Amino acid sequence: MALTAVRRESLALALAVAVSSAGCVTVRSAPPAFTDVWPPAEGGPRPTLTLVVSGGAVVDGIPRDLGPILDDWGWATNRAYRESGLFSDVLLRAGRSDLHAAVTLRAEVQQSDVLTALSYLTLLIIPNVVTTEIIVATSITTDKGEPLGTIEVRGRSRTWYQLLLLPVTPFFEPHGVSPEIVYDLNRQTIATLHGRGVF
């Protein structure tokens, strides 16, 4: 009887260790790191810009709120426009400016139901993989609302949830990886629109 109790305690301890050592790792799948000239070469007078950022998510086909990551993604977007050097000022509130940029940030999250079930049934010995498609849609208009240009660019990250990943989790957290993808997607957007002569 005592041996059975010891085995139960050992099993419970092993399960607790397994669960507590599980972690997640997020890696960038696309696009490759931004390699164009940054900041872009200025081409004339620098206009003022009002930047309006919004966002949402679709998880396995169901619309959801983007959640707290929207703040990080919004900050990455603001950073790209400010660092571009193409604008004399970037305003984050509605007001008078030469140009208006409406940036919509979307995440389309997908995972396999079968793989997710197997992963949890095996206590994450079989990894669960979540793919996040990141979409940055940008529309530039004049102060009178006249359209000047639109563009949509995409990136992707993959997050693995698996046993024994806890030690490396702090180095590959979603909050550390996905904002950099958004930052590069915005730099790509700015460089492309600048190349078209939009600003």
Image (spheres, helix red, strand yellow):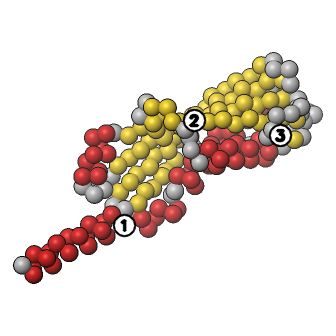
Which residue is situated farthest in the bottom direction here? Answer: 2
Badge 2 marks a residue whose secondary structure is strand
Q: Which three-letter amino acid code belongs to the residue tagged 1? A: Ser
| Relative image position of residue 73 (x, y in whole percent) | 64, 45
Which residue is situated farthest in the right direction here? Answer: 45
Which residue is situated farthest in the top direction here? Answer: 146
Counting the numbered discs, the total is 3
Label located before the other in sequence (2 or 3): 2
Q: Point out which mark residue 21 bears.
A: 1
Residue 33 placement, left or right of 143: left
Q: Which residue is mark 2?
A: 56
Residue under the image location 62 percent in, 44 percent down = 70
Residue 132 placement, left or right of 143: left
Quadrant position of the N terminus in the picture:
bottom left
Q: Is residue 132 above or below residue 104?
A: below
Badge 1 marks a residue whose secondary structure is loop
Label located before the other in sequence (2 or 1): 1
Q: Which three-letter amino acid code belongs to the residue tagged 3? A: Leu
